[in-house]
Image (tube, helix red, strand yellow):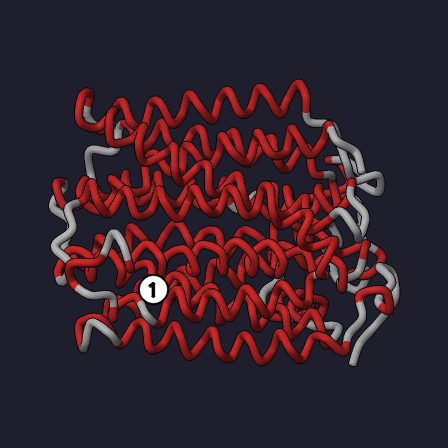
């Protein structure tokens, strides 16, 4: 396994996520200060994931065509510009524009994951994906702390400027140290070459193919669901992500309304989860995946997640930082296992020549869950504060059953270039 590309990929993703974590917790309050209605605040929160949903497959497919490096550079630069817009966003339309650009730029995670598949083998891939997941955990620990300090002492403009500078540094890091990992990439000018597969069209350039509507997207769906295990993993990706986002949105309301936790205490809870995530994904998962295998750990992750989401509202009122931390321990372990293992197994079961495209579709599925999750969590919480956790628990049970069904599909039986379909 090549070490250098993984280190640079880890650092670029980490810096990107720290910038994301700096801004994210401040968005609802700042939007409200600008006069946004509750619906508009929800729209501002959802536009980021919506852009990820749309552009993840595009970035992924582009990385298959022109290479991982140019896609990473372009998207990081766009993210930096988005935070500059954010620093000057004194109106709601500008704030929406800034978050839209940020969502487009951050959709590059599909290209980063595809780059990891380029430089790892089947035995080391889960560990590499876990390392990427650890970057998420670190970013969500450090980012909100920095954002809170900057907002309190310097205001929202400095928050945006700091995140922009961080991303420009990220761009320079990738520019000088990130090498191309896709040996089959054809380069930028291949975008304008005729594609034999689309020769029946008047305009056969790759850029034109991106504009084709339903049939093109249907092809992406067919490729992603071209084998039974990939299809099952995509379903797990959707329902598990929906369960987790649904729980996370409702948890903030629950801890504030029922347990009377302050914003600072809520921050401590999220930092606690993030810390465990870093330990599990960055240290334990690479060793556990080699010893026990992806299939068993996927089931264990779902079972731990069930405990970590279903029992959250049943913690005694005065025990949030005792019993509650125990429940969140299961939550952190579960998410630390399921998310990286899901992506790793999708890559292992999918076609080598379409890794970026399939990874991009997986990120779109994940983004769709992040769009739907806040709505389900808030609506169900309004009906009864326990309902979001009932739904999350039920979804993790379904995910457990699907994970168990994956045992009959041996990874070794799915060669990367095999046209496997069931």
Q: Quadrant of residue 264?
A: top left
Residue drawn at (56%, 70%) of the image: 236
**Percent position (x, y) of residue 138?**
46, 37
Residue drawn at (43%, 33%) of the image: 18
Q: Is residue 360 visible?
A: yes
**Percent position (x, y) of residue 164?**
40, 25
**Which image quarter holds the N terminus?**
top right
Looking at this view, is 156 or 308 the one in front? 308
**Image side of residue 39 versus residue 131, left or right:** left
**Image side of residue 257 versus residue 420, left or right:** left
**Image side of residue 84 versus residue 10, left or right:** left
**Percent position (x, y) of residue 312?**
30, 66
Looking at this view, is 146 or 228 the one in front? 146
Query: Is disc 1 placed on a helix, strand or loop?
Result: helix
Looking at this view, is 299 or 237 the one in front? 299
Badge count: 1
Q: Quadrant of residue 149?
A: top left
Q: Is residue 357 visible?
A: no
**Percent position (x, y) of residue 65?**
75, 45
**Which image quarter holds the C terminus?**
bottom right
Residue drawn at (26%, 63%) of the image: 250
In this rendering, the answer to whether 49 lies above or below 236 is above
Is disc 1 surrounded by few (<14), some (14 to 19) or many (20+) residues within 10 Å?
A: many
* Residue position for label 1: 247
In this rendering, the answer to whether 260 lies above or below 399 is above
Residue drawn at (71%, 43%) of the image: 116
In this rendering, the answer to whether 308 lies above or below 9 is below
């Amino acid at each position: 396994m090549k070490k250098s590309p993984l280190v640079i990929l880890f650092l670029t993703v980490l810096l990107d996520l720290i910038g994301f974590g700096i801004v994210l917790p401040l968005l609802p309050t700042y939007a409200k200060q600008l006069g946004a209605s509750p619906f508009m605040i929800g729209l501002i929160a959802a536009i980021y994931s919506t852009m990820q949903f749309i552009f993840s497959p595009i970035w992924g497919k582009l990385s298959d065509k022109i290479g991982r490096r140019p896609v990473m550079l372009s998207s990081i630069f766009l993210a930096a510009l988005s935070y500059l817009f954010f620093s000057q966003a004194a109106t709601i339309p500008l704030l929406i524009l800034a978050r839209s650009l940020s969502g487009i730029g951050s959709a590059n995670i599909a290209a980063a994951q595809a780059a990891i598949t380029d430089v790892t083998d089947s035995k080391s891939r889960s560990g590499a994906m876990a390392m990427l997941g650890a970057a998420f955990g670190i970013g969500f620990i450090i980012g909100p702390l920095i954002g809170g300090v900057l907002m309190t002492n310097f205001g929202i403009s400095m928050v945006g400027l700091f995140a922009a500078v961080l991303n420009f540094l990220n761009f320079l890091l990738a520019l000088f140290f990130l090498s191309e990992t896709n040996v089959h990439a054809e380069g930028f000018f291949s975008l304008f070459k005729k594609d034999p597969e689309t020769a029946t069209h008047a305009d056969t350039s790759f850029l034109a193919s991106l504009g084709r509507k339903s049939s093109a997207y249907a092809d992406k769906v067919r490729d992603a669901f071209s084998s039974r295990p990939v299809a099952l993993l995509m379903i797990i990706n959707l329902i598990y992500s929906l369960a987790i986002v649904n729980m996370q949105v409702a948890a903030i309301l629950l801890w504030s309304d029922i347990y009377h936790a302050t914003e600072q205490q809520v921050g401590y809870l999220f930092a606690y989860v993030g810390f465990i995530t870093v330990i599990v994904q960055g240290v334990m998962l690479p060793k556990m995946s080699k010893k026990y295998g992806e299939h068993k750990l996927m089931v264990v992750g779902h079972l731990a997640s069930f405990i970590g989401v279903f029992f959250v509202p049943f913690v005694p009122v005065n025990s949030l930082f005792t019993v509650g931390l125990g429940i969140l321990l299961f939550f952190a372990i579960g998410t630390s296992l399921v998310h990286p293992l899901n992506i790793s197994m999708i890559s292992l079961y999918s076609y080598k020549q379409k890794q970026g495209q399939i990874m991009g579709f997986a990120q779109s599925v994940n983004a769709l869950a992040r769009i739907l999750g806040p709505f389900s969590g808030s609506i169900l919480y309004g009906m009864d504060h326990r309902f979001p956790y009932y739904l999350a628990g039920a979804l993790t049970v379904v995910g457990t059953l699907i994970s168990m069904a994956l045992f009959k599909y041996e990874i070794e039986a799915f060669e990367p270039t095999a046209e496997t379909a069931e």
